[in-house]
Amino acid sequence: MYFVAGELWRIFAPFVPRNVLQRRFCSSSLAAEGTIFALSSGQGRCGVAVIRVSGPDSAHALRTLTGRTRDLLTPRVAHLCSIRHPRSHELLDRGLVLWFPGPHSFTGEDSAEFHVHGGPAVISGVLQALGSLAGLRPAEAGEFTRRAFHAGKLDLTEVEGLGDLIHAETEAQRRQALRQMAGDLGRLYSNWSQQLKTCLAHAEAFIDFGEDELIEDGLLNQVDSTVSQLRVEIQKHLHDNRRGEMLRSGVQLVLAGATNAGKSSLLNIICQRPAAIVSPVAGTTRDVVETHVDIGGFPVVLSDTAGLRDTEDIVEREGVRRARLTVENADLTLVIIDSALLPPDPHAAPDFLRDHLRNTLSADKDLAAAQNCLMVLNKSDLLTREQVSSICRVLNQTPRLPSACFLSCLTGHGLEEFLTLLRSKVTSLCGDPLVGSPSLTQARHRTHLEKAVKALGQYQQYREVDLALAAEGLRLGLTSLGRITGRVDPEEILDVIFRDFCIGK
């Protein structure tokens, strides 16, 4: 029936389950794209390089380059073979070869791997040998993973998790990526989709067959309850303070304050290298200086900014404008303050710091925007121990002020306490990626989830007015959730209807 053409196809196609058609045409399309190969390990010299082949001619490639047929196609067994060019029969290398028959492979297709020595000449020779075979071509970027997605081996969230794992630079990023690649996020969204699918099936069944008394009493009440609960769960998932997204892309940590407060010095201390110019001349930093650091296993994008002051210098004024814009977009702000400017009376320190925060953060009077900041009282070596102790006692008794710590970038005194407090702040922002529900990691997810919440609101809005229009809201919500994982199949709605109801028997 799959090969009926023209008018006959239009007659028979509606009777073929859509999921069967998708599997059939996806596999046919992939086969038509031929067999692909590429270096799957990293570029550059290494001990072992892995060259992957995937597609219908993988077995032929394996046999041709090794010249062996007996026992070579035993699945997932490594064989030590001589690898030769198929035309010149020149020995290219001796290495391990493995065979992965579909569908039990990463891509779901027949696949093979050549584990060869990692010298550039060896890699180039094997790739050229594979390219000389008819039906084989170099893979495009991400094509192995794309084939795995089409074969149903990965959903889109798992694909994104795999990409994040490859690019992970910190422990926390690795943990979050592994959890997403394992399918935790996809299972959460699929569970919501399944509940919504059942709600939509029940609503449509009530619309079509409610008058025939084949639908049990209270069915729509169950739908109302499930939709309401789903909407709350999705909204809670959305209101996570962007933890997963921050962990994936890095916490935006900004150093801000007046000129000569020690911002660049502190940046260099955190980076452990001279990333910014340090000078006693006020206004040395004119632009935003960014560097990436690992703080407590979490990725941080650390930005040094121009000193905040009124100036007639047009270049410095632009630097101040950029500094304020960077502070507005920061996830966490380190407000650097010159301790020598603190008032002699410790009890006047809170008011002084409030004014300083308002000027730095452009916060309102209740300093609501100051909660994601840390005050660093630099140049503490200019104060006596008694002065530091007195100010600390007053600040500890003052409510609604951000955390503060004394530090001397010159002597290093207070550095450990500062780094401990900073790690605590960053950890609090990102959370533990292994605890609780999986975090939302992509702006794409957020967009579709917001559309799903809006669609469920449409159901609640029109439930008593027009059930058909309300059901359309459920359908839109289901489509939005399906687009996150890449699995949208309206035929499954009918499966639920016929499974849950004895309609037409």
Image (cartoon, rainbow, N blue to C red):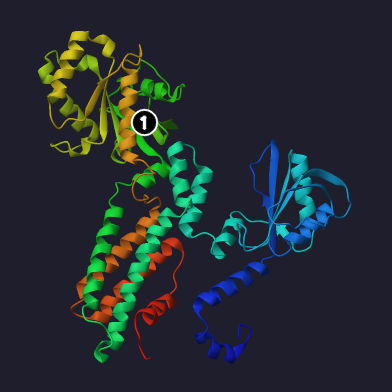
Q: Is residue 446 above or below residue 276?
A: below
Q: In this view, does 171 lie above or below 26?
A: above
Q: Which residue is drawn at 88% across and 47% down?
A: 90
Q: Measured from the top left, where is residue 366 in percent x and y?
A: 13, 37
The image quadrant of residue 393 is: top left
Q: Which residue is more in the foreground, 278 or 81? A: 81
Q: Measured from the top left, where is residue 475 in percent x and y?
A: 34, 73
Q: In this view, does 266 lie above or below 176?
A: above
Q: Residue at x 43, y 24 (%)?
A: 276
Q: Measured from the top left, where is residue 260 in percent x and y?
A: 31, 19
Q: Measured from the top left, where is residue 38 in percent x and y?
A: 68, 51
Q: Is residue 72 left or right of residue 321?
A: right
- Looking at the image, can residue 132 be seen? no
The image quadrant of residue 446 is: bottom left
- Looking at the image, can residue 13 be seen? yes
Q: Is residue 66 left or right of residue 207?
A: right
Q: Is residue 273 left or right of residue 445?
A: right
Q: Which residue is more in the foreground, 40 or 447? A: 40
Q: As shown in the figure, which amino acid type bears the numbered disc 1?
A: Val
Report the quarter where the N terminus lies. Answer: bottom right
The residue tagged 1 is 315
Count the marks: how many?
1
The image quadrant of residue 219 is: bottom left
Q: For numbered disc 1, what is the local secondary structure?
A: helix
Report the quarter where the C terminus lies. Answer: bottom left
